[in-house]
Image: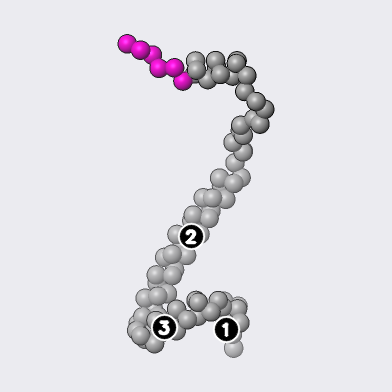
Amino acid sequence: MMNESETTASDTEPVVENAVQTVRDRFGASGLRTLIALANRELARVEQAEASLAILDEQEPVAEPTSEPLDAADTQAWLAYTEIERE
């Protein structure tokens, strides 16, 4: 009997299925256990990264630059803002 966490061959990408079969054929049960351990570590890292990205996605958007043409006042303000004090 198949439980919810198991997938059928039709649910699995052929590349993933081939990779698992290659490990099984070359390294046997020991190799599959190692593969599972590595996959679990990668899964944890990916889930953590996705959670971090989700937090960033929920934050307020960064101000976008205006599409209007810049005028002399904008240029002067930028120059004053970026001017380096000379000794």
Query: Which residue is disc 1 drawn over?
Result: 9
Q: Position of residue 31 (x, y in %)?
A: 36, 80
Eye-nearest disc, 2 or 1: 1
Circle 1 SS class: helix
Residue extending farthest to the right is 68
Label 2 environment density (alpha carbons within 10 Å; few <14, some 14–19, many ≥20): few
Amino acid under label 2?
A: Val
In which quadrant of the rendered image does the N terminus lie? Answer: bottom right
Query: Which residue is disc 3 drawn over?
Result: 22
In the drawing, what numbered circle is on residue 73? none
Eye-nearest disc, 2 or 3: 3
Q: Position of residue 76 (x, y in %)?
A: 54, 15
Q: CA distance from mark 3 to mark 1?
A: 15 Å
Specify whether residue 39 is in view: yes
Please say if 29 is above or below 36: below
Quadrant in which residue 32 is drawn: bottom left
Which region is colored magenta?
A: 82-87
Ranked by sequence position, the earlier of labels 2 and 3 is 3
Amino acid under label 3?
A: Thr
Answer whether residue 16 is magenta in the image: no
Label 3 environment density (alpha carbons within 10 Å; few <14, some 14–19, many ≥20): some
Say which residue appears at 40% left-offset and 17% top-offset: 84
Q: CA distance from mark 2 to mark 1?
A: 24 Å
Q: Nearer the viewer, residue 15 or 69?
A: 69
Query: Which residue is disc 2 drawn over?
Result: 46
Q: CA distance from mark 2 to mark 3?
A: 24 Å
Q: Is residue 75 left or right of residue 85?
A: right
> Do tag 2 and tag 1 residues touch (Cβ < 8 Å)?
no
Specify whether residue 3 is in view: no
